[in-house]
Amino acid sequence: MKSSLEGTSLIGSERPDARGRSFQAVNPSTGDRLPVRFFTAGEAEIDRAVKLAGDAFEGMRALTGRDRGALLRAIAGGLEERIDDLVERGTAETALPDGRIRMETARTCAQLRMFAGLVEEGSWVDARIDHGDTERKPAPKPDLRALRVPLGPVAVFGAGNFPIAFSVAGGDTASALAAGCPVVVKAHPNHPGTAEIAGLAVREAVAQNGFPPGTFSLLFDEGINVGKALVTHPGIRAVGFTGSRQGGSALMAIARERPEPIPVYAEMSSVNPVFLLPGAVQGGGSGSADTLAASITLGAGQFCTCPGLLFALQGPDTDAFAAALRERLAAVPPAPMLARAIADQYRSAVNRRKARRGVEPLFLPEHWAEGCAHPCILRTDAATFISEPSLMEEIFGPAALLVVARDRGELLVAAENLEGQLTATVHGTEADLEDFGELAAILERKAGRLLFNQVPTGVEVCPAMVHGGPYPATGDGRSTSVGTAAIDRFTRRLAYQNWPDALLPDELKESNPLGITRLVDGAWK
Amino acid sequence: MKSSLEGTSLIGSERPDARGRSFQAVNPSTGDRLPVRFFTAGEAEIDRAVKLAGDAFEGMRALTGRDRGALLRAIAGGLEERIDDLVERGTAETALPDGRIRMETARTCAQLRMFAGLVEEGSWVDARIDHGDTERKPAPKPDLRALRVPLGPVAVFGAGNFPIAFSVAGGDTASALAAGCPVVVKAHPNHPGTAEIAGLAVREAVAQNGFPPGTFSLLFDEGINVGKALVTHPGIRAVGFTGSRQGGSALMAIARERPEPIPVYAEMSSVNPVFLLPGAVQGGGSGSADTLAASITLGAGQFCTCPGLLFALQGPDTDAFAAALRERLAAVPPAPMLARAIADQYRSAVNRRKARRGVEPLFLPEHWAEGCAHPCILRTDAATFISEPSLMEEIFGPAALLVVARDRGELLVAAENLEGQLTATVHGTEADLEDFGELAAILERKAGRLLFNQVPTGVEVCPAMVHGGPYPATGDGRSTSVGTAAIDRFTRRLAYQNWPDALLPDELKESNPLGITRLVDGAWK
């Protein structure tokens, strides 16, 4: 490691003394404690971070989209400079392979630069201008201009399963900073060292780009106190979270107790159903078996878009597909999970599901390797699935449940029975998809992203991505946490009426000094 | 009246039997009960309305933006056909003058046609297309396309103070229908006859334009049971409300008990502060006194944008302004309020405020006319205002409190002390506004709309309007309930990945058959 870790929170440009409660990260591959003690942020430190964020929010008003773009690019550069440290510490803390951390860092940097481009260009504010008309009868028409403005300090929770892309400098932080919101990150306790490395990159970029120190803080805590204090703090104006349904629901419940409600963007859980229509399993469907086995086991099944439920119609083709998928999954070696406790939960969840009446194991490991995820596939019939809600629950890891329906009607009932999902996928021929139009209509109501003949893992970072879906996939199903539209989450609209041109934000000035696309008198210009 | 009222709820195309609990509307000018008994919707009727709305939501999937535009235009036409009935019953139920009901109906029809134009044109869905690239390394880029889709059935609460524009066929209903969401309206109990007339216009338009009957239902209730049942009903996907802070907070609390959270757009309360900078009161500020007196007393002060707090710096100019405003307000005759109970509440609230230590009446009526609102103006100093939170509460009616600050610093503290507001207004010279840049920076964080040298009443219906603001002005401060952006409230984003072109929504097809503006590979086209 080039950088030495200190283990204390980053409170703007300050670091508190190393004292009080502390914890250490554990290498999930070995079970050993990793060096450096991380010190839990206390109440005064949390308060200080939010206070500095409030000050920074006022200070950031004077900074432009170009300034914010420069900040985001500098953060990306800082992460790239620290890539060796991120890989060394990240692999040790998460058991994710070297290549994954590198790819995740590349994705994170591309995401930071995407938001930089967005705010440097500037049209994202959805500027709208309606010119006044003093002659209008019966009443003169006022001059009105509106744009999106930042909400204020945002609390971001690092995700356990994405130590880089959904953590300290991940999508929530990038989109919040892009919008003009200071960020207070609570590091995920499983990878605090990775968090500190990334946090130092952000802090350095903040300092070097003339942003107020409180633009970014990073707090450590092994437990829930820091998170609770952040979500209830009156100075926090929005929350970004990626994690379990249990964790997200707890945060949402805490937030509901605030006297002043704030948006909580909790991306929580999804079983990402895949519907195998006749064409997909014809002759055993080896194509779908290949891609689905790869998707189920990618990253040891620790993706929020991991396909956990497969639906098909009964018949010999589906049986052949099941055999093919079983064979593919059995060939994938066990892989260490993000934490020993997660592997234990995975094994327990698979065993509980296996024990359900009407559920038959197709492939389960004979012996479980400590801390590892073995691919698993179980099978049930649609009637059992429809009558047993627990079969809809996400199992975090590379386990899938194949649900076989007697007929089209039962398949549709099973689909209608699904909770809100991040994704829903259909495999088959185009003729199948057209033929099953009712299925597509149901899935449109259930999911944020629909896929055809592809797999839900691999969330492209682009303007058209929607990574969010109806509850409980996301706490606020109107939002996406990936792609350029993620910036909208941390904004509200603000209108100016009859405001002097010279004192308007540049985005709304008559001369359009930023050259952005605007809705002027009802037409995009 | 051309149409005869029946007093039973409109459940899609059905009307239940006239039985069970009932209530009558009261003419606030006379205190007399108005003809026709209105029957409270029972549990089965509420369920039926939501069930039909769910069916309609599926049915509306086959209908296009042009179809929805035709529906909205037909509703506007239906209201205009019924204008005499609306005026006759509306004036009797609300004591609002004839001209006001006509103007409000015209505004409502213009609003319906604005949303019709928006959805007929179609670009509002924010269509985004990112073309795939199978050659991209290290992984192929998928084809992704996204648009805004409707959330599902919406519950709308008629507002007491806008019997047409924020009620049955008002802004919430218009924007929800425009988005493709069926609507279940709970009529405001103070003007149920007006609601029935408007409801029949909507129902007729639904039937004549080939929309499923459950696209629109209208439920009556004098109490809170219907509202509570709607907000907790699993079939309802969003709520639109305009009314008191007490009412909106109660709805939000009820909604929080749902297992599945939904957005509640409650536009609740606002005191709409006005800051009179030195140029505005120079020589007594007769211009500001004129426009503010008119704004305070417009519609008997029963607008959510009624300016209830005026701030100025101490000195002889402000004293002269106070005298001028006092004179203008004293010249405005008392006007009947929307209900006798509302007039009683107004009088009590003014008297309570008058009794506060440090508050001095500038003008109060000597005798209160039954059911009427008399303009009132009180004065206090900023120190008292800052220390007494009750002085920030909205008084529903034509009462204003002039808050006089010793100096600029105290004025800024008072501004910083404000809760979230729909609007904040500054009067003065441009040089004043520039000089008080810190004030503008504070107000940008506090309000949804900032005005200069105009008055907040008169909410223009146009793309750049923001009628919404930080809590408690609005339950969800990210939203606007007026203007084209109001449609976004009832939508979420949905992405299609690798979906066959022929089966995509028209908005996303490669050939762009609707000819809408889209974000294609990062550029607006």
Image: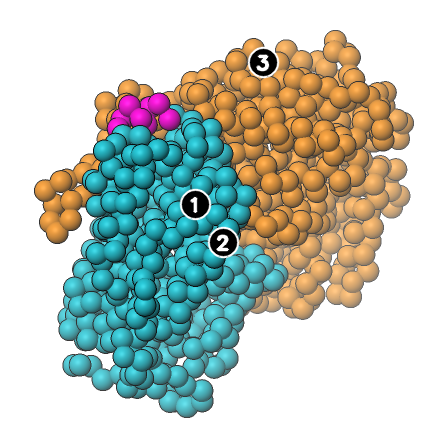
Chain colours: A cyan, B orange
- The residue to which callout 3 is attached is B207
Q: Which of B377 and B326 is in front in this view?
A: B377
Above/below status of B168 relative to A275 = above
Q: Is mark 1 on a helix, strand or loop?
A: strand
Above/below status of A216 relative to B521 = below
Estimate the x, y position of residue B454 in percent, counting from the top left: 53, 41
- On what subunit does the disc labeled 2 rest? A
Measured Cα–Cα span from mark 1 to mark 3: 45 Å
Number of numbered tags placed on the structure image: 3
Measured Cα–Cα span from mark 3 to mark 2: 49 Å
Tell me, yes or no, whether the highlighted magenta stretch contains residue B351: no
What is the three-letter code of the residue carrying label 3? Ala
Q: In which quarter of the image is the C terminus of chain A?
A: top left
Pair 1/3: label in front: 1
Q: Is mark 2 on a helix, strand or loop?
A: loop
Relative horizontal placement of residue B389, taking residue A170 as reference (left or right): right
Residue A356 got which mark?
2
Estimate the x, y position of residue A446 in percent, counting from the top left: 44, 39
- The residue to which callout 1 is attached is A380
User: Residue sitting at 68 percent across and 32 percent down?
Assistant: B47
- On what subunit does the disc labeled 3 rest? B
2 and 1 marks in contact (CB < 8 Å): yes
Query: Which segment is the magenta one?
Result: A429-436
- Magenta-drawn stretch, dominant element (helix, strand or loop): helix
Pair 3/2: label in front: 2
Which circle's residue, 2 or 1, is located before the other in the chain?
2
Q: Which of A400 and B435 is in front in this view?
A: A400
What is the three-letter code of the residue carrying label 2? Arg
Measured Cα–Cα span from mark 2 to mark 1: 10 Å
Q: Determine if marks 3 and 2 fall on one subunit.
A: no
User: Residue sitting at 21 percent across and 46 percent down?
Assistant: A290
